[in-house]
Image (tube, rainbow, N blue to C red):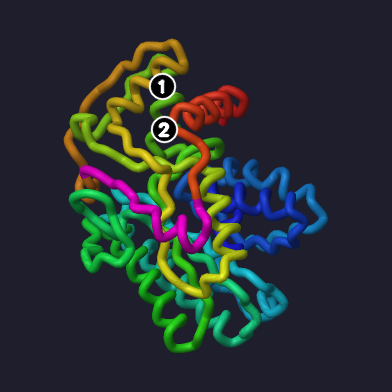
Amino acid sequence: MTGVAGFIGSSLAEKLLKENFKVVGIDCFTDYYSKNIKKKNLTNCLKNEHFTFIQKNILELDLEPIIKNSQCLFHQAAQPGVRASWGSQFDTYVKDNILVTQKNLESAKEVKTFEKIVMASSSSVYGNQEGKMIEESTLTKPISPYGATKLVAENLGNLYAENFDLPVISLRYFTVYGPRQRPDMAFSKFIRSNISNKEIEVFGDGNQIRDFTYISDIVEANILSMNSSSKSGIFNIGGGSTHSVNQILEMIKNITGNENIIKFKPKQNGDVFKTESDIEKARKNLNYSPKIDIKKGLENQFQWILNNSQ
C-alpha cells in the first residue's frame, strides 16, 4: 500500500490487518502537514507482526522486489489540496500524483502478480457540473491543477488496463471525513476552531454543497473493490447525501454546544460549487452502500478530536 501513513491509508491498513491480511506499507512522510500526525496514524499498524513499513519516496525505490509477491496494490499516495496546487507547487503534484502512479503501474506490469490494483482518485476530476456526477460522463473538466493531475492518474490506470491487462480500479472519493482527517481539511478546522472559541474561516458564502463520505465507508469501498469480480473500471464513492457548508456548521454547533464564530472570505480558485455522486455503478458492481450518515460521522470525528489533541 502506498501512502500508508495518511488519513485514508492508515485507516485502510488497520482494517486489512484486522482481517488477517499481511500489509506492506510505503510512505515518505511529505511535509504537507505534520509528520508527527502521520507517525501517530501508524501506531496500531506498527504493533502488528503482519505489517511491514518502508519509509521512502516511491520514485527512489526499486519497487519490483517489494511487490513481486503481493496480490493487491492499494495506491493511496498523492499530494492533496485543491488550493495549494496552483503556482510553484505544481511540480510536486506532477511528481506525487502522476509520476508515482506511472511507476506503480509500470512495476505492476513487470511483476504480473496483482489480482487487483485499487487507486484513489477524486471527485475533483469532475469540476463544476449540474446534477449528479456520473462516471460514464465525458464531462470530466477539473478546474484545479490538483484535479487535473488526478484525472491524468486515472487515465494512466485506464491505459495500463487496456494495453497490459492490468486489473486497475479507480475510486473517485467524494470529500472524506472522520477520525484522523487531515488538519488542513474543513471539518477538522471547523471543529477545532469551534471548541477553542476561535474564528472559523469559510471561503465563499457557505452555500456551497458537498457530498461527504465517512472514512469507514471509504475503507469498505477499497476492500469491496479488492474482492469484487470487476477487473477494471472507475467508480464514484460518495456518502449518499449532500449538505451545504452552512448546514455542516450548524450541525457542529449542535454537537459541541458552542456557538460558531464565522468569518466569510472570498471564494478560492479551483473550488467547485457542488459535488454530488451517483453511486449506482458502485452499488451494482462492488456492492457498495454507505453506512454512516453525516450526523453520526460528525459526532465520531468530534469525539476523536477531543480524545486526540495534536
Which label's residue is closer to the chain start, 2 or 1?
A: 2
Rendered location of residue 256, percent (x, y): 46, 15
In magenta, the rendered stretch is: 273-288
Amino acid type of the residue tagged 2 in the rendering: Phe
Identify the residue at horizontal 20%, vertical 34% (top origin).
204
Classify residue 246 by image quadrant: top left
Secondary structure beneath label 2 = helix
- In this rendered view, identify the residue nearer to me: 174 or 184: 174
Q: Is residue 310 left or right of residue 205?
A: right
31 relative position to 72: left or right: left
Residue at label 1? 252
| Image point (38%, 35%), residue name | 186
Q: Amino acid at mark 1?
A: Ile
**Is residue 88 visible to us here?**
no
Helix, strand or loop under label 1: helix
Q: CA distance from mark 2 to mark 1?
A: 9 Å
In the picture, the quarter occupied by the C terminus is: top right
The image quadrant where one finds the N terminus is bottom right
Residue at mark 2:
187
Are circles 2 and 1 on residues that touch, CB within 8 Å?
Answer: yes
Nearest the eye: 177 or 279? 279
Which residue is at 65% across, 61% downward?
25
Residue 297 position, x and y percent, is: 50, 32
